[in-house]
Image: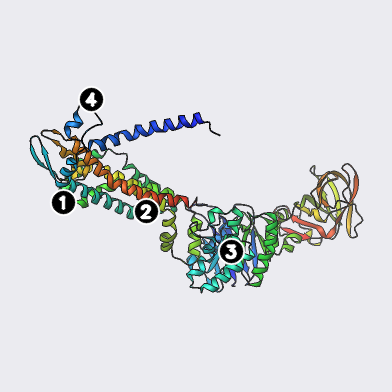
Amino acid sequence: MQSPAFRVVRALLLLLIGIFFLFPIVWVLLMSFMTNVDILRSPPSPFFVPTLRNYVALISGHLSTSSGEVQIDYMHNLLNSVILSTCSVIVSLILGVPAAYAFARFKFRGGEDMAFTLLSFRFAPPLLVLLPLLGYFQAIGLYDTYFGLIWVYQLITLPLVLWITRGYFEDVSEDLELAYRLDGHSWLSTFFRISIPLARPGIAAAGLLSFIFAWNNFIFALILGSSSVQPVTVGALAFITASGIEYGQIAAALVLSVIPTLILAIFTQRYLVEGLSLGAIKG
Amino acid sequence: MSTLILDDVSKIYGKDTRRSVDGVSMSIKDGEIIALLGSSGCGKTSTLRMIAGFEDVTSGTIRIGDKVVNDLKPSERDVAMAFEGYALYPPLRVRENIAFSLLKNRTPRAEIDKRVGAVSDMLEIGPLLDKYPPSLSGGQQQRVSLARAMVRNASAFLLDEPMSQLEPQLRALLRARIKDHMTAHRMTTVIVTHDQTEAIALSDRVAVMDKGLLQQFGTPDDLRERPANLFVASFIGEPPMNIFPGARTENGVVVLNERGEAAFGIAGATGGLSAHDGLHVGIRPHRIHVGGGVPGAETVQGEVLSSHWLGDHSHIGLSVGGCFLIAVGDRDATPPAGSVVPVSIPRDAVHLFDSASGAAIQHGL
């Protein structure tokens, strides 16, 4: 049995870790309800009069600063983020899940090399690729389009989907698929009815992770698009105005931008737990 | 429900030069139960997977009924299989796992329930029907997997190590039930196993494989009394056959000990033997009688080196003229170590093999 002292110490340590990780988030949440004056007060104080003006400014699109009114398009950026991340993940799942299955199940010439090449996209510094790519994109008319950005986002999302789901497919016993095929089903229906459902926790995890990576991307959209397609990460730059940095709005923007990812995480978490609680697939 | 014919079937994996299955031919009759027996890597599972359609046939033909199935997909071959790794669908209950293939064929609900009930009673898994596979023990999962195969009405049934995980008592009970069921329903069945007791208990004929080659395909009696070669002779039987180098004499054979000296002779007719120089002599331990006095047997003097009581019989180690011989005896007939006793070797229990090829030359003198 654990002694009471041990339990107290453990709770204390857990609390410390919790505070350490949660403090910045809590502080940002508080900041989003403060005016710039409150935020910049020294020493900082947790006691202030909460205000909704940061959120109002973001949602209405009118940002009043000391040097006049600035138009910002934050809600449009938020919508862009949703469009870009969602479409990128969907495209990656459509391309990556069958590819991951192929890499997991079949040995073919160059298979490992292909899989590794896709992974190696994650090693390269993005800027190295982006500058020449900018030239091409402008030449063929992909600059500043959703299509072009979603295409480039595949560099982020596809390797993740591929390598995570591949591991899950490898864990699904091949005998399960063979048993299903012996019962008179085609290869394709085996893939959809047996392999994909059994790898679903992995697919959900890969989808969630690649969504977060896509959501957090900054550099691709900064270079390959204008404000009409730029996501929140780039859009937040607008809060660095001529009259100073609008910390309150940045904090509010951050809170708003976290919400979609948070909802998705909570939603897929249910899937993950459900999938994993089915128990290990015996191979 | 159908014949199953393998004609000169070979399998080479990828760029391998070795044949994993090498020219296997066997003809399995409608409703016959056969076992593919051999140690791991002998090609038995590859053969089974070719019949199921999971592996391409490198050369040769496989026929189920009068249909050549070489190029048919697994789904088109109408075979049922129980996998060694069970291959149960984790999200489905045991009942749904068993009924799975029947649902696909639009079998009426009442009929499905009846058949699932019958097969699960036979395999003692009735109480497990509403559980999920991951909550079952290995032995239980194995029986579910067996039930899922046996509930079908397939042309052929393929069972890969079907009873390896069962407890001994249950195994003995189920062997008899499964055999009765398969015979009653005329199920053409191929069982892959490395357990010769199981192969012999379940099947009408046993195919012994080694290094991809079919060594012998015959009834359990054939394998025991008329082994085709040294491999089968030494593989079948527990304890294994006593095998010694030997030589022909005018009126029989002589068994040589490790130093190449004559240890003892066995008189008898060796008609077709003149051309053979290199010779091996095999004697089944079960046929050697310690104590002597058996009519029609060669009786020699042997020293008892050891005796091992195994619960229902004993293994007696004997030295006869420098040859180490294992015999099987009853408790009453077990002499103490160190004593010298007469040892009877019935002439019809002596097998002669060609040393070079290993092929059997003569069974019984």
Q: Which residue was labeled with disc 4?
A: A43
Element marked by disc 3: helix
Question: Pointer 4 indicates a residue of which chain?
Answer: A
Determine the CA span between mark 3 and mark 4: 75 Å
Q: Are marks 3 and 4 on the same chain?
A: no
Q: Amino acid at mark 1?
A: Gly
Foreground: disc 1 or disc 3: 3
Foreground: disc 4 or disc 2: 4
Write down the quadrant of residue B43 in the picture.
bottom right
Question: Pointer 1 indicates a residue of which chain?
Answer: A
Determine the CA span between mark 4 and mark 2: 52 Å
Question: Pointer 3 indicates a residue of which chain?
Answer: B
Foreground: disc 1 or disc 4: 4
Of the pair A280 and B293, the residue shown nearer to us: A280
Q: Is residue B154 visible?
A: no
* Residue B41 image offset from top left, x and y in percent: 59, 52
Element marked by disc 4: loop
Question: Pointer 2 indicates a residue of which chain?
Answer: A
Callout 1 crowding tier (Cα within 10 Å): few <14, some 14–19, many ≥20: few
Which label number is shown at residue A141? 1
Q: Amino acid at mark 2?
A: Val
* Residue A71 image offset from top left, x and y in percent: 11, 43
Determine the CA span between mark 1 and mark 3: 62 Å
Callout 4 crowding tier (Cα within 10 Å): few <14, some 14–19, many ≥20: few
Q: Which residue was labeled with disc 2?
A: A97
- Which residue is painted at 21% across and 47% down in the image? A78
